[in-house]
Image: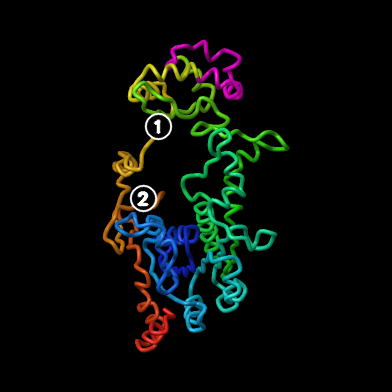
Amino acid sequence: MRPLEGMTVVSLEQAIAAPYASRQLADLGARVIKVERPGVGDFARGYDTRVRGESSHFVWTNRSKESLTLDIKDPRGLDVLRRLLATADVFLQNLAPGAAARAGLGAEELQGANPRLVVCDISGYGLGGPYESMKAYDLMVQAEAGLLSVTGDGDDMAKVGISVSDIAAGMYAYSAILAALLERGRTGTGAHLDVSMLEATVEWMGFPLYYAFDGAPPPPRAGAAHATIYPYGPFTAADGGVVMMAIQNEREWQRFCERFLGDPDLALLPQYATNSARSEHRDSLSVVVGARFAALTSDEAAAALAAVPVAHARVSTMQDVWEHPQLAARGRWHTVGTPAGPVPALAPPGVVDDAPRMDPVPGLGEHTRTILGDLGLSGAEIDALATDRVV
């Protein structure tokens, strides 16, 4: 039995944050009913067509769900949603700020009908405050959270290459929902969760925030290198390959100087004796370390670092990740169905299961008739709703 079997999640979701949170709940066995606009659906379905005609974002965040198309602006559609929520365990939504409350889907109103319901609202900036009504997409929140001030190189900022603010909010929603369900098991009462993309991202900004504490200078943009630890980052080998490596403490630094650089006395020089000193003098130290890498092929450098031992890694392409030997050895790739046919999918991290839940990614409205039938609507009633484009 999966941990959340028997739980029903109704998610009025779009884009990444809420769909990613609800997919984690589905992975653990919850029944997730994804409510989408009739004829259009979650707009993430149209982001691209890279997975045999399906959207890469959508395939990633929507497996193991049921798709229900519903126009909640029509009173009949809203009634259907309310009937679902009357017996649901979780309601998750990330509509535009205030839209759910204006539709009569605020936590207080819903919990009046179903006191056990856990209501989770995800928004850019949270309820209240001057930013409450602002639209918030991932890049906007990366900017507001200060993330762009520490990513990139020199004066050139760079966004993180994935939707990190959406993902952060989705994961905090997921963990908060699990905690609320545990609390409900003791109290019998649901909870209202208010998850902000800004707060989720700023939580992940703890290191640069404290590094710049009390008006101190922030960590500089350092490209692929670590901004405050050295040597820690990419080095180019003689064959042009890039090897990532990291020194984390003084014991490693001393062994690195002795066994990789062949110069144990280097570790004793005052300008390199501590991490703070090495980071301050990284320009001169990079010449020494870079010269050693330039004398080795990337394979030779990796082998020499392993012999120290020092943490190191290759810079994988997307194709390298699909073929990564560690993922293959641990059997982490499985297959999930999509409207365009089966595709590989990574098993849920942390779950050790020979047969993890990997149910299909739903087509738009695929489960509408079944869900409405389960609510007691007749075939004629469903046909009428479909004719009027309510579903």
The residue lying furthest to the front in this view is 156
Residue count near mark 1 (Cα–Cα under 10 Å), binned few <14, some 14–19, many ≥20: some
Left or right side of 4 for 250: right
Q: Quadrant of the N terminus?
A: bottom left
The image shows residue 50 at horizontal and vertical percentages of 34, 54
Give SS at disc 2: loop
Left or right side of 97 for 375: left
- Residue at left offset 51%, top offset 54%: 166
Left or right side of 62 for 148: right
- Residue at left offset 52%, top offset 44%: 159
Give SS at disc 1: strand
Q: Amino acid at mark 1?
A: Ala
Numbered tag placed on residue 313 in the rendering: 1
Q: Amino acid at mark 2?
A: Val
In the depicted view, which residue is nearer to us: 355 or 12?
Answer: 12
Which residues are drawn in magenta?
A: 259-286
Q: Earlier in the sequence, mark 1 or mark 2?
A: 1
- Residue at left offset 53%, top offset 58%: 173
Which residue bears the numbered disc 2?
A: 352
The image shows residue 120 at horizontal and vertical percentages of 55, 64
Q: Is residue 369 above or below residue 212?
A: below
Magenta span: predominant SS is: helix
Residue 28 visible to the viewer:
no
Q: Nearer the viewer, mark 1 or mark 2?
A: 1
| Residue 110 within the segment the image draws in magenta | no
Query: Gap between marks 1 and 2, in whole Å?
Result: 25 Å
Q: Quadrant of the C terminus?
A: bottom left
| Residue 264 within the segment the image draws in magenta | yes
Kindly indicate whether the residue at mark 2 contacts the one at mark 1 (C-beta within 8 angstroms): no
